[in-house]
Amino acid sequence: MNDILLQAADLIKQNKSAALCTVVETDGSSPRKANSKMLVFPDGSISGTIGGGSVEKEAIEEAKKVLENGNSVLLKYNLKKDLSMECGGSMQIFIEALLQKPQLYIFGAGHVGKALKNLALNLGFRINVIDERPGIFDSYPQSSDLKCFNEHFAGYIAREEFNENTYIVILTHQHIHDFEVLKLVCNKPHAYLGMIGSKTKVAQAAKTLLEEKICTQEKINKIDMPVGISISCETPEEIAVSILAKIIDVKNKKYNE
């Protein structure tokens, strides 16, 4: 049991996902007793065991669902009646998700990017900020949840791995760089993609993406541009609030659909 808990702690430290299955109660004959634990990974592989057979197979399938929706579940089985297991007792299994922190990529470390970084750090995001300008990160303290990359946008994007838990905000210092980043990330996996800009600028960006067959109209429709919720805001901090509010809305709806 301790090995599984240590492994779970290591997964959290590495920001990797798994579901922790714990036998919380048994009655009569059962393959494992209370406090037995098993980790289930997104691909269905496991570490540890809660007894094998049909009950473990059912738990693995339920654990994969928990990883998709983020909602813990308590399973109750009469082993003979529900699963045709001859041991004949009963088991209760609690399954909880050890989910990755959402990964926020901020392209552009200017006033709005800095304000967005400050807000997002307090809400459980792991953040990568990318900007090519020399000295731009002199006032950016780095931590386990904040990494800064002083390099060209295209080179960074080429080597980075994005996934369905990725949130991308484009706030660079020049329109040409905004579009450069947009066309490179629009077909990458992501939960959210937003770009700052005027209505004229974003309309032209959408038109170019479509005309140059960079991405489909369906994908263009999902890009949040102009970025953020529609509120009256002026300062970098206010703009950052509107952006983060939109990201939070997307993130929470993802697990409540």
Image: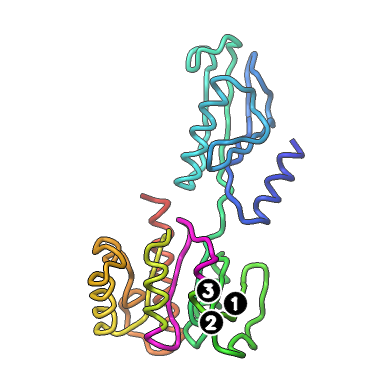
| Marks 1, 3: nearer the viewer | 3
Label 1 to label 3, Cα distance in Å?
A: 11 Å
Residue at the spot of label 2: 131
Vertical arrangement, residue 174 with respect to residue 162, above or below: below
N-terminal of the pair, mark 2 or mark 3, is 2
> Which residue type does callout 3 highlight?
Gly
2 left or right, relative to 195: right
Residue at the spot of label 3: 155
> Which range is magenta?
155-176
Residue at the spot of label 1: 149
Q: Residue at x 43, y 81 (%)?
A: 171
Q: Position of residue 9 (x, y in %)?
A: 70, 50
222 left or right, relative to 106: left
Q: Where is residue 125 in the image (x, y as percent from the top left)?
A: 55, 66
76 left or right, relative to 2: left
> Which residue type does callout 2 highlight?
Asp
Q: Helix, strand, or loop for circle 2?
A: loop
Q: Residue at x 56, y 64 (%)?
A: 124
Q: Helix, strand, or loop for circle 3?
A: helix
Q: Residue at x 58, y 44 (%)?
A: 18
Label 1 to label 2, Cα distance in Å?
A: 6 Å
Contact check, label 1 and label 2, Cβ < 8 Å: yes
Vertical arrangement, residue 26 with respect to residue 64, above or below: above
